Amino acid sequence: MQITPENQAHEKLEQDAKDFLSELGFLTDEATYHTVMNLEVKDRLSRIYTPTSLYLRGRADRIAVHKSLPLVFEWEAKTHESRNLHDNAVGGIAIMSSSDKGSTGRRVSLRLSKSTQKS
């Protein structure tokens, strides 16, 4: 699978999710390491494969915070163009991390997936 930055279908899926969450009263923002960390830290993290670096790189790309209720969660949208994946795309490290945090009640993970494959 190839990652394609600025993929229009991905950007639309992300915007649809933001709009949906906004209608439910959530504020959304970026949380991905390569957006919120400085270039030197980002570059160094991208070349280290320790459990902590994989955790930091595998966190969800976005957060949602409800405007009036005590609800906060991480989320991300996944798209792909592979015929082999059908309509499935997930971040394995992020899912494992979500499962671990979910068991303590600290995190809910919303993962949206959409194929960008042409029919």
Image (spheres, grey):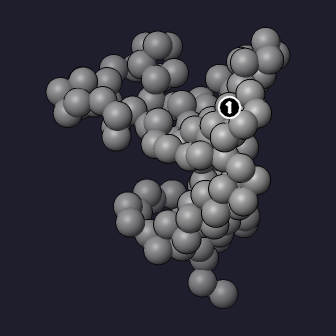
Q: Is residue 30 left or right of residue 89?
A: left
Q: Can residue 109 be seen in this snapshot? A: no
Residue at label 1?
72
Q: Secondary structure at mark 1?
A: strand
Residue sitting at the far left:
40
- Residue positioned 34% across, 34% down in the render: 36
69 in relation to 1, above or below: above
Q: Is residue 114 left or right of residue 51?
A: right
Closer-to-camera residue (89/65)? 65
Closer-to-camera residue (72/91)? 72
Q: Is residue 24 left or right of residue 62?
A: right
Residue 116: x %, y % from top left: 59, 73
- Residue positioned 72% across, 18% down in the render: 106
Query: Three-letter amino acid code at disc 1?
Result: Val
Closer-to-camera residue (27/31)? 27
Residue sitting at the far bottom:
119
Q: Quadrant of residue 97?
A: top right
Q: Residues within 10 Å of mark 1 (few under 14, many from 20)?
A: some
Residue 30: x %, y % from top left: 46, 42
Residue 4: x %, y % from top left: 41, 63
96 in relation to 116, above or below: above
Residue 51: x %, y % from top left: 50, 13
Q: How many marks?
A: 1
116 in relation to 78, above or below: below
Quadrant into which the C terminus falls: bottom right
114 in relation to 65, above or below: below
- Residue positioned 50% across, 44% down in the render: 29
Q: Can residue 38 be seen in this snapshot? A: yes
- Residue positioned 52% across, 31% down in the render: 58
